[in-house]
Image (cartoon, rainbow, N blue to C red):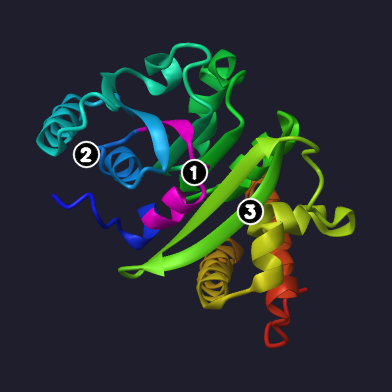
């Protein structure tokens, strides 16, 4: 293991952890991120939380090998139950689905009172996190989208504040889907992600079109797909499709 250098994905997460903070990395796996942050003097204390026995043991082993057991506390438990109230001011959760991330935050909501920043990297469904931020008084302050080893990742950063600021109110549905910061930058990873998503939705739509007897559920699904396709086409300024 080399905790001196992180993957691009985890390096992007690390970039948004405030210097001097006390951080908890939930679902820490091998504790790469907490070890890196401590070794580079980015944080004063870190917790590596893990619910699965194998990765928990791996994290403990890695922290011991790095001689960081005094600064990185490895704990086994489900989500935020590994934290004491007031123990950290930054939480990172990376490598899970967006729905699971918000479930972790909802279940451990009482542990968020001292937390001033959330750095979240959902593998899918970042939209759910943006919606959760708005519903729970967290302001989306930064986003990044990147590609590594053929996979595309989004990193979302939230702080307590005006949850609807940084969104274009007239385009909020679209910006919740693709991200207000990301849709303005529209880098290569962004265009690739949404081009692929659009093609996938179109394929599913065509399959539903071919169903013999459309049900109410099928019709609802088709409308939902059309809406998302149109929203993405607006962002990509795609003139080629003629969806109606």
Residue 190, image x, y percentages:
56, 70
Magenta stretch containing residue 201, yes or no? Answer: no
Q: Which mark is residue 17?
A: 1
Front in this rendered view, residue 104 or 165: 165
Horizontal side, residue 51 vs residue 179: left or right? left
Residue 216, image x, y percentages:
69, 45
Front in this rendered view, residue 221 or 67: 67
Q: Which residue is mark 2?
A: 30
| Residue 243 figure quarter | bottom right
Residue at 41% of width from left, 15% of height from top? 81
Q: Residues within 10 Å of mark 2 (few under 14, many from 20)?
A: many
Spatial separation of the CA atoms under disc 2 and disc 3: 26 Å
Horizontal side, residue 166 vs residue 196: left or right? right
Spatial separation of the CA atoms under disc 1 and disc 3: 12 Å
Q: Residues within 10 Å of mark 3 (few under 14, many from 20)?
A: some
Q: Residues within 10 Å of mark 1 (few under 14, many from 20)?
A: many
Q: Which quadrant, please, contains the C terminus?
A: bottom right
Foreground disc of the pair 1, 2: 1
Secondary-structure class at tag 3: strand
Q: Residues in magenta?
A: 11-26
């Amino acid at each position: 293991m080399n905790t001196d250098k992180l993957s691009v994905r985890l390096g992007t997460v690390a970039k948004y952890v405030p210097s001097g903070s006390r951080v908890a990395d939930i679902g820490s796996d091998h504790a790469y991120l907490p070890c890196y942050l401590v070794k580079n003097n980015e944080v004063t204390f870190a917790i590596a939380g893990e619910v699965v026995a194998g990765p928990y043991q791996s994290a403990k082993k890695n922290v011991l090998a790095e001689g960081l057991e005094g600064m990185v506390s490895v704990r086994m438990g489900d989500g935020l139950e590994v934290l004491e109230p007031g123990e950290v001011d930054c939480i990172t959760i990376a490598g899970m689905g967006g729905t699971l991330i918000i479930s972790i935050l909802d279940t451990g909501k009482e542990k968020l009172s001292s937390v001033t920043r959330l750095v979240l990297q959902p593998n899918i469904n970042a939209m759910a996190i943006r919606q959760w931020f708005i519903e729970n008084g967290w302001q989306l302050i930064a986003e990044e989208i990147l590609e590594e080893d053929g996979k595309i990742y989004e990193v979302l950063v939230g702080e307590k504040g005006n949850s609807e600021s940084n969104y274009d109110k007239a385009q909020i549905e679209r910006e919740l889907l693709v991200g207000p910061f990301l849709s303005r930058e529209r880098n290569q990873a962004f265009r690739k992600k949404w081009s692929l998503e659009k093609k996938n939705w179109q394929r599913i739509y065509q399959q539903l079109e071919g169903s013999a007897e459309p049900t109410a559920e099928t019709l609802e699904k088709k409308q939902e797909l059309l809406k998302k396709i149109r929203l993405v086409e607006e962002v990509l300024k795609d003139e080629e499709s003629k969806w109606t």
